[in-house]
Image (tube, rainbow, N blue to C red):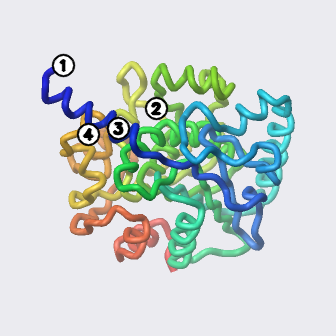
Amino acid sequence: MNIKNWFYYTIIIVVLSACSAMHNVPSSQVPNNFINPNITSAYVDQNGNFYPNQWENKFGQAPKKATRKEYSLMKIATENGFQQDLISFENTQLKAFANRVKNKKRVIIFIHGINNDYMSSLKNYNKARNFMDLNKTTDEVVNFYWDGLVTNNIFGAAKVWVSATTNSQLAGEYGLRRILNSISNKEIYLISHSRGAAVVLSALRNPELKYVEKRIAENFHHIDVENAAPLAENSNKIYSIMIAPAIGVKDFKTEEGNFKEFSKQLKMIHSTINETDFILGKGKTGILASSFTSTDFGFDPKTHQEIATQYNLCETTDFTGQKSHDFKDYIVNPKFKEILKKFKLSK
């Protein structure tokens, strides 16, 4: 390793060890619930397991400093002998959701990015929903929350990004996918922000986890990452709307380097491109870019084109000129309303 690379990696190690991040845990003791007439709240932990009612009584508070190894629902349940209780709750909740949407026509699912807590995500979901023309009888809205970690420290954002990358993949593979598998013969709109795009892709097709992350999932959290149930072919029509997607070419490829094949249920990936989004730009031009997961699908038109040529379902809307990466700023941009109009979701 040359001196320049050694210097950069030393900076990374110092920053990541010095700054802390917290788990994004529910503020409610009944976080997975149904709000009449047409809103479902779905809250999963870092491995995609659903928080049960009165979860804190059995699982306790998450540690103030989040790590990949320590805190998860399945880890605590398995090691304390109530694994079946957690599984039973999840199955019951998913069956209730399937029954709730049985007669619906459309299901709209919001997925936030990293470094978001419950309240900030809820505010953004509500803001986005206010721009939408939704039928209380035939449309169901799912507010999906996952453990993208939370920090108030500007330097802690680097640690959040590194740790939350795997969380996004497992949240999709085990959390969001089970929701999708509960739905049949519906139009499904997945509206994601930032790293939420990785949650979506991981729900549609298994992510490529690093060897060490597989071992952590299996040995510390008792999650069998090799045998996750695949996306069921339930005759849905799935439309992915990726706002400021913090993903890259690698997220679309298998371990062998081939582009993934997605279910025929996936009808379109409509993403934003923003060459002035500073956060996404770090994945393409930052001095530490090679050390982090790429984010240039939502930043670089060439990267978008490389992926689009592999799939006959990619479209884009250019947001270049907007400097903010925040979901709330993308939502109020008039171009967001244009995207909703394209999918017949706008007022």
- Circle 2 residue: 261
Quadrant of the rendered structure where residue 253 is?
Answer: top left
Q: Residue at x 55, y 59 (%)?
A: 117
User: The residue under label 1 is which amino acid type?
Assistant: Met
Q: Is residue 150 left or right of residue 243?
A: right
- Circle 3 residue: 293
Whether 2 is drawn above or below 203: the answer is: above
In primary-sequence order, the first of circles 1 and 2 is 1
- Circle 1 residue: 1
Residue that lies at the very extreme toward the left in this rendered image: 3
Q: Residue at x 25, y 48 (%)?
A: 282
Viewer-closest of 318 and 138: 318
Viewer-closest of 6 and 120: 6
Tell which tag, 2 or 3, sits nearer the viewer.
3
In primary-sequence order, the first of circles 4 and 1 is 1
Q: Is residue 33 visible?
A: yes
- Circle 4 residue: 306
Q: Report the Cα–Cα distance between label 3 and label 1.
A: 20 Å
Q: Are marks 2 and 3 in contact (CB under 8 Å)?
A: no
User: The residue under label 2 is which amino acid type?
Assistant: Glu
What kind of element bears circle 2? loop
Q: Residues within 10 Å of mark 4 (few under 14, many from 20)?
A: few
